[in-house]
Amino acid sequence: MAKEKKRKQPASDAAPPQGDEGEGRRERKGKKAKKDKADAILPSQIKNKDKRSELHSKIKREKKAEKRKLARERSQAIRRAEELGEQPPERQVPRTIENTREPDETVCRPDDQELFAGNDADEFNDVLKQHMIPKVLITTCRFNSGRGPAFIEELMQVIPNSHYVKRGTYELKKIVEYAKNRDFTSLIVVHTNRREPDALLIIGLPDGPTAHFKLSKLVLRKDIKNHGNPTSHKPELVLNNFTTRLGHRVGRMIQSLFPQDPNFRGRRVVTFHNQRDYIFFRHHRYIFETKESKVASKDKKAKTSESKSQPEKQVICRLQECGPRFTLKLLTLQHGTFDTKSGEYEWVHKPDMDTSRRRFFL
Amino acid sequence: MPRTTVLESPGCPPLRTLTTDILGLVKVVEARTNPAGAAKVVETWGEPDASRAIVAASLAGRAADPVLAVARKNGVVELLNPLNGDAVAAVKTVGSASDDGGAEGDPLVALHLFTRQASDSMLGTFIACTDKGKASIRSIMKENAASGSDAGPSTTWDVCSGGNVQFCSVDHGESYAMFGGKGTEVNLWDIASCSKTWSAKSPRANSLGIFTRPWFTAGTFLCKDDHRKIVACTNNHQVRLYDTSLQRRPAISVDFREAPIKAVAADPNGHDVYIGTGTGDLASFDMRTGKLQGCYIGKCSGSIRSIVRHPELPLIASCGLDSYLRIWDTNTRQLLSAVFLKQHLTTVVIDSHFSVEGYYLFSTVVTAP
C-alpha cells in the first residue's frame, strides 16, 4: 500500500496543470466508503481462496486502470503544453538501482589532475599512447574442451594481433615469462570448468596488473540469430560506465588489449558495457544507410505539409551482432603479474563489502 | 545480503598523519575536531612524477625540529620539514652514487630516520637499505645540507651476501637494526660497531620433509626497552617471535590466513602486534601466547603496505594499495575514519605532537639553511 502511495505522489507532481486533480481523486475515493473498506482488508487476510483471488484480481484491475489513467493524463498534459507552446512538463525518470547508487568518493572527476598524472605513470601508458603495438597471447587452462576452443577462436577474431599458444602442462608463471620474453603486452587465460568457459584472467605484461573475471552467459556466434561475420579490420572500442578509480583502471586494462588506431572503414565495434559491476561484452558490425522513410509520406497524405518539406531521405544506423556475447564480473585485481602465493591485491571482493545493493565498485 | 546499511564511522580524535604514494606526493591528513571528527586531506606536497615515487618514509617525531625523511625510487633520500613540506636536504644514497647500475639495479627499500640527535648542528641521521642489502648510515649536517653532495660522515656495510632485503627496523633505543628479506634470514646488527650480533635460523623441515626458504616481509622489535624480542612476518603467512637471548629458531610461530603478511607494527604495551596482509586483512596478535586477538573489519580491499601505531592514543593507521588511509581504534577494533587518497600508498606516519590548535606546543621554527 505504501508503495502505491509513493508512486502516486510524483505523478501528481508531474502534472502541474492538474495539480488539484490528485486531491480530487482521493476525495472521490473517499466518497466510496465501500471501496475504502475493501482497501482496508488485504487479500492475504482472507482465508477463502475464491474470495481472495477475486479481491486480488479486483485490486489489480483497479491499479491497472489507475495507471492507464495517469499515463493518459500525462500525455494529455504534454499535448496541451505543445499546443499552447509552453514548456512540456518534465518527464518522469524511473528510479532504478543504478541511478540511486550510493555516493562514492572514488568516482573519477574530469578535473582531477592527479588522475591524469596517475594515468601517465601506469602500466598501460605505453600501449595507450601508441608507443607500443598491443600483442596478446591467448592460452587456456590445462584441460580445454567443449566450448573453450570455439570461444578462443572467436576471441582471436575480436582481438587483433592475438596469438594462441597451447597451454600444455606449463605453469602459468612460466607462460608469463615466455610471453614477457617475446614482447607480448597482455596475456589472456580462458579457464574452463566442466567443458564450459567460466573464468577469464587478463594479465598485463611485463608488470601490469592481473585481473580475474568470472565469465558467464557465453553465447557463441553460431547461436546468435542473424549474426554477421566480422572482417579483419581493427575494431572500434566502446567502454561504458567505468566510473570509479578501480573501474577506470579495469577499463584502461581492457583498452590496452586493442590497437588504438581503429579502421573506421571496417565499421566494426566492440563494446564493454558496465552495469552494476557486470561488464557486458558485445561485438557488432554497423552500417549507415540512407532510406526513404515511408512513415513520413503517409503523414503527408494525412494532414500537415510543412513538416514534410524536410529531406525525405533518412540516415539509419543498423547493427548486426557478430562474435561472442558474454558477461564478465571482476573478482580480484592483483598488483603485478600472476602470483597466488605472494601476490598483493589491489582489490579483492570480500563479503563484508556487500553492505547494500546500491553500492558498486566499477 | 542486507538491502542497505549506513556505515557511520564515528570519527577520530585530533590527529595528523602523513602518507606517501607512488607518484611521489606527500599528503597530510588531519582530524581537527575534538573529541572526534572525520579526517581530511589538508595539504599535498610535491608534483606528481612516477620516477620520484616514494618507497619508504620515516619521521623523527621530536617536539623540536621534527624531520621527515623520504626515500625515492631514483635513489634520493630527501629530508622534509613535516610542518610545511619544505625540502631541507636531498642526498644520493650509496647504491646510486656508485656506478654499478644506478638506482634501477638496486633501489632503496627501507629507511629509518633516527630520533635522537648527536648535536645541534646535525640535521638528521638516517639508515637506508637497498634491495641487494647495502645498508648505509649517513648524517646530514646543517651547513652542507643544501649542497647535498658531501653530507657528513657515513658508513656502509653489506647486510646479506645473497638474496634481497625487504625490510629494516630499528629498535627504540636506536642501537640495533634488524634486516630480513627474500632469501635472507632475520639478522640483528649493532649500529655503533656495524657488526652482526645475531641471525636467525630456519625452522626445521616439517613432518613431510618440506623445507621453506626464508622470505621475510616485515619485522619489528616487540618491546620498547628490550631489543631481544623480535617479531618477524613471512611471505608464507607466518608471524614469528624470535628471542635473540634464547635461541636462533623462532620461539612462537603462528599462521594467519593464506595471504602473505606485508606490514607489522608493535604496540607500546610490549606484547601486541598488528599485522596486515596482501589481501587487505588487518589483525592483532598477542605475542605472549601467539593468540589472535581479532581482525579489523571494514571494507578494506587492497593489500596493506604500512601500519603505524599512535604513541599515546589507542589508534592505528593503515594504508595500502586500495588508496585509503584508515584509522582504527585498537580497543574496539572499529574503523574510526577512512580517507580516499587517490594513489597507491606506500607509507603512513603519525605526527604525535599535533594538537587541535594547529600549533606545536614546544616547537621552534625549523631553520632551513
Image (cartoon, rainbow, N blue to C red):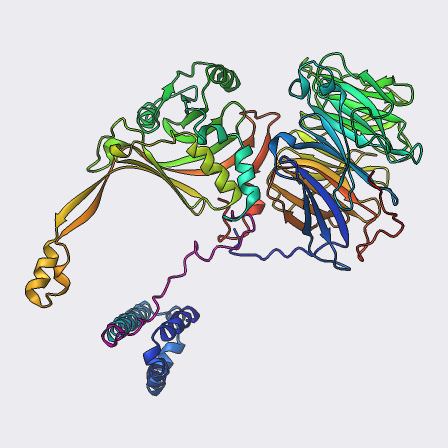
Vertical arrangement, residue A36 with respect to residue B310, above or below: below
Extreme residue toward the left, this view: A301
Q: Position of residue B220 (x, y in %)?
A: 80, 31
Residue toward you, B104 or B91? B91
Residue drawn at x 61%, y 55% as measured from the top left:
B7
In the displayed structure image, the side of residue B44 where residue B67 appears, left or right: right
Answer with the quarter of the image where residue A218 lies.
top left
Vertical arrangement, residue B364 with respect to residue A206, above or below: below
Extreme residue toward the right, this view: B119
Q: Position of residue B321 (x, y in %)?
A: 61, 37
Q: Is residue A249 visible?
A: yes
In the displayed structure image, the side of residue A236 where residue B234 appears, left or right: right
Answer with the quarter of the image where residue B142 lies.
top right
For the N terminus of chain A, give its image quadrant.
bottom left
Q: Position of residue A83 (x, y in %)?
A: 22, 75
Label count reads 0
Residue drawn at x 56%, y 51% as measured from the top left:
A105
In the displayed structure image, the side of residue B9 where residue A138 appears, left or right: left
Magenta stretch encompasses residue A38? no
Q: Where is residue B171 in the image (x, y as percent from the top left)?
A: 86, 31
Q: Is residue B239 visible?
A: no
Chain part drawn in magenta: A81-109
